[in-house]
Image (cartoon, helix red, strand yellow):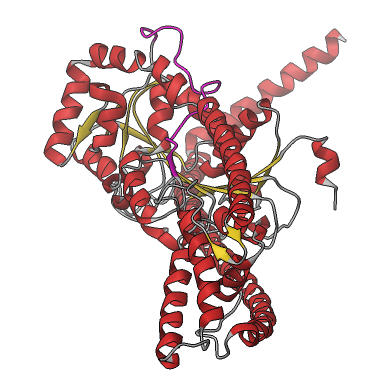
């Protein structure tokens, strides 16, 4: 295995984990093109960048920052590897992502502002809005708006094995739509009239957009409801191509009245009429968005934001450690707790530290002069349970900072975090001794849990691989069936031509027999015999003259 640190040559190592499979067909995946565009701009910021397909996600190569492009594939950060910063960029399918998955990252970037606000209220991990973007070095408008377009209406996408509104309605209203996508035979009557090809290579997509007049678009229901938009819309606008899409407030906020939206079939028909009657005006509005797209919705802008986010996370990680160290150093005097007064009451690290310290004091006081020892155990158990919940709300970086604890508060930390015990059964020094025994047991259990977690991740990835293989096998079966149908058609055409050939051969045979009968009749006639008798001396005379001349 190559040493990635040597290859990086002192640069930070960034890993982009994308959901495409490691197969020859990966170049047809939009995730593949997305990851490579992001890689290009991160490298320009001075990073060493690798891309990993979903088949390579269990690699444990060196990395400083890991960015997971979250679509349909789930990845859980491996926290046994120290020092890494994990960033999720949720691009689509928000209904498939749980709060627990969000909380396992150091930073969550969401391409929808309204959904980002909802997630921010539910989790304690920082949430940033990172919009969908386009590579503006590839997707850009043509030099002139008046040149002749090769296509009128275009659509790029597969059927997803269902009726897609924009395509179904386009066909129903007689729009001359051209489709680049697969599996449309069951959903579009006379699909061969509409489908140009089953795939559009990503590197050819900009030329298509610049050579078309308008494109139609729709979204998965969970995406449009939560403000997630299709990357095709940003790419089309970057090329100066007008778009008709299903309605979203986010689209109006991003592009204003340059985008034509529909809520139902009636509005879709109205927007198609508008694009015909007001094409020049709408196209000019789309072209005016070009500076906005470069500034806000380009890969360059998003890569710069990710770079800033990573720097802020590194700074925050160090500040958490320094804060815990300062609390350990400044808050304990002669075994007495003193509020340092340096942390705001709402500061989570300060609150949790104080709880650890108070828990350690309670442990020492259990059984020492208390009249109701059983009650004191119950109070301590309740406090421990509450503290574990409070500690669980901290981010991973904040939790890791408490490993820097020293002094009295560390005893409370070890009991709360690294031990599975409830209330201690001994007081004072005896309690501490029991605590460390349970701590070793907890560490062993933690190792077992980590192994089980790793095994679970492997099983999940294996399940995803099997699902991908099944999907690929279904696609191959469909392709074989399509080719088989084509072969049947070609065979039928050959048989038809053979039947025609056999018929012509039969007709010609009949004509030959008829001519042979006529010739035989001629030979039997008196005229023919008389001609033969008269012709004989004439032929002989001609031969004698020829010999005399010689």
Residue depicted at x 62% and y 64%: 334
User: Residue 505: x and y, percent?
Assistant: 50, 48
Where residue 253 sits: x, y (%)? 27, 29
Can residue 227 be found in the magenta stretch? no
Question: Considering depth in this image, is 116 or 213 the residue closer to the camera?
Answer: 116
**Rendered view: 97 above or below 116:** below
455 or 213: which is nearer to us? 455
Q: Where is residue 196 in the image (x, y as percent from the top left)?
A: 43, 36
| Screen quadrant of the C terminus | top right
Residue 157's quadrant in the figure?
A: top left
Evaluate whether residue 21 shows in this view. no
Please, what is the dominant secondary structure of the magenta stretch? loop
Residue that extends furthest to the right in the rendered view of this protein: 550
At 15% from the left and 42% from the top, the residue drawn is: 264
Residue 90 appears left or right of 417: left
Above/below status of 400 relative to 424: above
- Residue 246 placement, left or right of 92: left
The stretch in magenta equals 127-147
Q: Is residue 237 above or below residue 525?
A: above
Asked if the magenta segment contains residue 145, the reply would be yes
Q: Can residue 172 be seen in this view?
A: yes
Q: Is residue 547 left or right of residue 147?
A: right
């Amino acid at each position: 295995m190559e040493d990635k640190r040597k290859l990086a040559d002192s640069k930070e190592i960034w890993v982009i984990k994308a959901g495409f499979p490691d197969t020859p067909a990966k170049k047809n995946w939009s995730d593949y093109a997305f990851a490579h565009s992001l890689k290009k701009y991160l490298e320009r910021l001075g990073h060493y960048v690798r891309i990993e397909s979903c088949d390579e996600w269990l690699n444990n190569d060196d990395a400083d920052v890991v960015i997971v492009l979250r679509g349909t594939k789930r990845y859980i950060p491996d926290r046994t590897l120290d020092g890494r910063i994990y960033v999720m960029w949720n691009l689509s399918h928000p209904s498939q992502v749980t709060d627990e998955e969000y909380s396992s990252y150091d930073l969550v970037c969401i391409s929808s502002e309204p959904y980002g606000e909802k997630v921010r209220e539910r989790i304690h991990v920082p949430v940033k809005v990172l919009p969908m973007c386009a590579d503006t070095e590839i997707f850009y408008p043509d030099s002139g708006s008046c040149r002749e377009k090769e296509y009128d209406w275009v659509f790029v996408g597969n059927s997803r094995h269902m009726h897609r509104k924009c395509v179904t309605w386009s066909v129903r209203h007689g729009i001359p739509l051209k489709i680049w996508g697969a599996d449309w035979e069951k959903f579009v009557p006379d699909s061969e009239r509409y489908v140009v090809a089953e795939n559009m290579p990503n590197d050819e997509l900009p030329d298509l957009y610049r050579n078309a007049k308008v494109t139609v678009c729709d979204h998965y229901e969970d995406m449009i409801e939560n403000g997630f938009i299709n990357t095709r819309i940003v790419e089309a606008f970057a090329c100066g191509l007008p778009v008709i899409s299903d309605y979203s407030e986010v689209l109006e906020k991003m592009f204003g009245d340059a985008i034509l939206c529909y809520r139902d079939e009636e509005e879709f028909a109205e927007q198609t009429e508008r694009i015909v009657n007001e094409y020049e005006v709408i196209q000019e509005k789309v072209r005016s968005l070009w500076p906005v797209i470069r500034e806000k919705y380009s890969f360059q802008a998003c890569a710069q934001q990710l770079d800033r986010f990573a720097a802020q996370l590194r700074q925050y990680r160090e500040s958490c450690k320094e804060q815990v160290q300062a609390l350990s150093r400044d808050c304990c005097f002669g075994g007495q707790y003193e509020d340092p007064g340096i942390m705001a009451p709402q500061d989570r690290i300060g609150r949790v530290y104080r709880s650890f310290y108070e828990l350690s004091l309670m442990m020492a006081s259990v059984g020492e002069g208390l009249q109701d020892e059983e009650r004191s155990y119950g109070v301590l158990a309740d406090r421990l349970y509450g503290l574990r919940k409070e500690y669980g709300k901290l981010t991973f970086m904040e939790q890791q900072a408490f490993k820097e604890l020293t002094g009295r508060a560390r005893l409370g930390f070890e009991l709360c975090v690294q031990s599975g015990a409830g209330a201690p059964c001994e007081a004072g020094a005896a309690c501490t001794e029991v605590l460390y025994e349970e701590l070793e047991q907890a560490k062993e259990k933690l190792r077992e849990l980590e192994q089980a977690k790793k095994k679970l991740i492997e099983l999940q990835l294996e399940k995803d691989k099997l699902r991908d293989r099944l999907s690929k096998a279904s696609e191959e079966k469909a392709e074989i069936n399509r080719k088989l149908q084509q072969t049947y058609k070609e065979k039928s055409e050959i048989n038809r031509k053979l039947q025609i050939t056999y018929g012509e051969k039969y007709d010609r045979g009949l004509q030959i027999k008829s001519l042979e009968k006529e010739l035989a009749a001629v030979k039997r006639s008196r005229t023919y015999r008389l001609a033969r008798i008269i012709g004989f001396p004439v032929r002989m005379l001609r031969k004698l003259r020829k010999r005399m001349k010689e």
